[in-house]
Amino acid sequence: MVGHLTALLAFFAQVAGPDQAALVSALSEDPGCRRWLDETVFYDSPEWIQHVVRPRERIGDLAVRYGVTRSEIAEWNRLKSGRARLRAGKKLKIRTRRAPPPREKITYTVAEGDDWGEVAVRHRVPIEDLKGWNSGLRGSPLAPGQALKIWIDPGAARTVNCGRGEEPPAIEVRQDATSLGHPQGGRLKNGILLPESPLWSRGKDKGLWASSHTVETMIQAFTQLRVDNGYSGDIMIGSISRKRGGKFSPHRSHRTGLDIDIRLPLLPTVPENTYPNPDAVDWPALWELIEAFVDTGEVSMIFLDHRLQKNLYRAARWEGKSAEELATIIHWPRKDRKWETIVRHSHGHKGHIHVRLLCGTEETRCGPERATVLERRGWIEPHPSGLESRMGASARREEWRREKRGIYGRSPDGGAVEDEAP
């Protein structure tokens, strides 16, 4: 076994690229965030270890924990498949370069005002697991004094909100790149090729052209993620637009430099070439990236498959957001009126999110008009007509509140608004 720090740096050099030193530095500011690193044993080369299955552990959990594949675990242990169910107490042999600390069973005494959801959030565990570990109480509300069994995971990676990151180098952005028309039928004038930066990784140049407004918004959002949230993992920008915008196969939008495809960030415990399946995704990091974009005030909508939004919602709660704060941002757990939220479902968005920005304040030939979108969202009051002015401001605001118009899709009053084609 090699020295801890040397092994740690070598490990992140393999799975997290050149940012590993920044991650170690950020984590050093919060001992609670470091536990998964401090208690992990690293090996020079892969070694066989024994893993004792804890209640409700899945093969996918173990694959991420040990940096191997589900099929490898199944093959090593003669299981039917990588999705076979595991029995608590079963011993598995796994060949790995690291052995993180195992799950620990604790007992939590229910306090006044506790409910299942809040207890799960407080201990960073899924509510389904919490109820499964305490199946005898599953169908009833919690009562003060009850004892709950909880299997916490000190081996789970923590990559955000553990410390601040370093300020990135400044990026000069020229101001003449402009979006013209609508996302599904417009073009891009004087497009800017997304610059290389430690803020992000880039896909192919052919599809990474953007407006000045888009590049500036991306810099603002990613700087918040890197500095305020301390995230140093890799995030890949896949597609924005072509140099002059217009049709960009296979996309139906991405024509005006306002649409950004961003690969879901991976946990630092999985290899870089792993497909971002739900087990491998760093959901807290994705949430902080989405919140950083929302905080710019420049987001029109963000597409993510509805079945994956549950993971995003749970991560947002773990990072301190309340259900009320998330109600206008993430569509899950609702199934209707998706136009009222920012993160919404669209087919084909499982391995990446699609961020669509508002038109810039100076982009007068860009659509849909910025004020129209903000008005539908309820962020600004609608401009009064002469009749509304005669009705009086109070009556007009009350009428506006009753309408509760949404963005895109179809508004509650029956008026057609913009198609959501990705």
Image (cartoon, grey):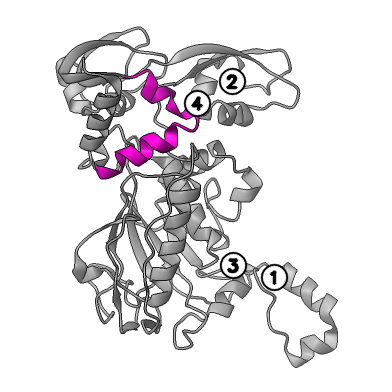
Image x and y of residue 128, in percent? 50, 27
Residue wearing tag 4 = 32
Residue interval drawn in magenta? 18-40
Separation of residues labelled 1 and 2 (CA atoms): 40 Å
Asked if one can make out residue 278 in the rendered structure from this viewpoint, the answer is yes
Name which of mark 1 and mark 4 comes first in the sequence.
4
Using the rendered view, name the quadrant where residue 156 is placed: top left
Residue type, label 1: Glu
Task: For mark 1, give the secondary structure.
Answer: helix
Type of amino acid under label 3? Gly
Q: Which residue is mark 1?
A: 403
Residue extending farthest to the bottom is 386
Residue contact at pointers 2 and 4, CB within 8 angstroms: no
Which quadrant would the C terminus be assigned to in this image? bottom left
Query: Nearest the camera: 101 or 263?
Result: 101
The x and y percentages for residue 413 are: 63, 73
| Quadrant of the snapshot with the N terminus | top left
Q: Earlier in the sequence, mark 2 or mark 4?
A: 4
Is residue 315 placed above or below 414 in the rendered structure? above
Disc 3 versus disc 2: nearer the observer: 3
Q: Earlier in the sequence, mark 1 or mark 2?
A: 2
> At 40% across and 81% down in the image, what residue appears?
175
Residue identifier under label 3: 406
**Mark 2 highlights which residue?**
138
